[in-house]
Image (tube, rainbow, N blue to C red):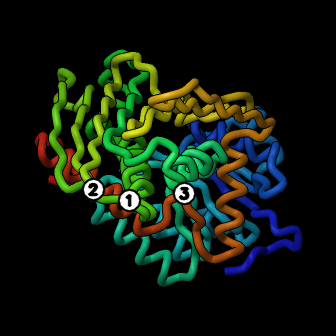
Amino acid sequence: MTLMNSSNALNWGVLGTGNIARLFAAALQHSSAGRLAAVASRSPILTDVPEFAGARGYDSYDKLLADRAVDAVYIATPHTTHCEWTIKASEAGKHVLCEKPIALNAAEAERMFATATRYGVVLMEAFMYRTHPQTEKLVQLIREGTVGKVELIHIEIGFGRKYDPQSRLFDPTLGGGAILDIGCYAMSMARLIAGTAAGTRVAEPEQIHPSTRRAPNGVDAQAYAIVDFPADITAVIAAPLNLVQSRGVRIHGEAGEVHVPSPWLCTGRMGGRSSIVITPRSGEKVEIPFETTDWLYAIEARAFRDAVMAGAISAPAPDAADTLGNMRALDTWRESVGIAYPSEK
């Protein structure tokens, strides 16, 4: 499929009208790489929502996918529906940026990528932090051996959400739970850093030593793991939904430490400041500042547009092999603590 306009800007359709859909739509208003052409919801669309201003509104996802003016689709529905609508979007000839986690499990993700390949469209998992210049710099620092041989990666990502059985985060029928919702971020970062340290795009775990604490309905409210990677690299992951944490990443090497205080939102949803802090074993701390007016999801939209133009996804954004490896690691993590969803049973 080729772009349907001469400016190389994608005409986007958004499936879903929840919070993440609105964040992405708002960012498109600040991006020259794309514009919001259409939005679809299974419930009545709020025509006065400013993030969706000027977009065609559809009362079904199928109707949006039939819109020939739409080049690419951002899937912002619950991840229990990602497989179905990614496949349908691919069959309709739309490029797909699908929210994380890309699917409930690796088997679904494999079908999604196979369909995208069959229909010649680009499919990418929407880990927005992977497209940010801060992450590119982090990869460069590790690759250059800034802290020597990497031995330990410490990742925190909890955000203190109170247990609510009605919330998507804790609803097993919607794939709720810490491992899939936020553990996916931590595992993707651990694989990225371990792989970079070993000279590859990502690394796959050799063994996962898990621990969880369950919510009253059995969903994993807190997820922890010690992950063994090749080259004697260990990652320690803390991903509780209901605890507040620093949400930072620390990478410990023989020659010092790299600290990323804001690894996920980087410079912020609407632009701002962040930094990477290097602490050598001998010497003073060095802070590498980042400042941008670019909106976080606008950066992601631009990276996806570039992937569509090139026909390939540039690292550190996740390509098919990366995403499938992450889903397999999440499958192993869940299986080892007995977490399965109704649709999987």
Q: Percent from the top left, x then y, of residue 2?
A: 72, 79
Residue 249 shows in this picture: no
Q: Which residue is mark 2?
A: 231
**Which quadrant of the figure has residue 221?**
top left
Residue at x 73% of width, y 42% of height: 27
Residue at x 74% of width, y 37% of height: 51
Q: Amino acid at mark 3?
A: Pro
Query: Of residues 61 and 174, which is closer to you in this image?
Result: 174
Residue 172 shows in this picture: yes
Left or right: 298 as drawn, with respect to 213? right
Query: Of residues 136 and 12, which is closer to you in this image?
Result: 136
CA–CA distance in space, label 2 to label 3? 20 Å
Q: Which residue is mark 3?
A: 316
Residue at x 44% of width, y 34% of height: 256
Q: Which residue is mark 1?
A: 198
Q: Nearer the viewer, mark 2 or mark 3?
A: 2
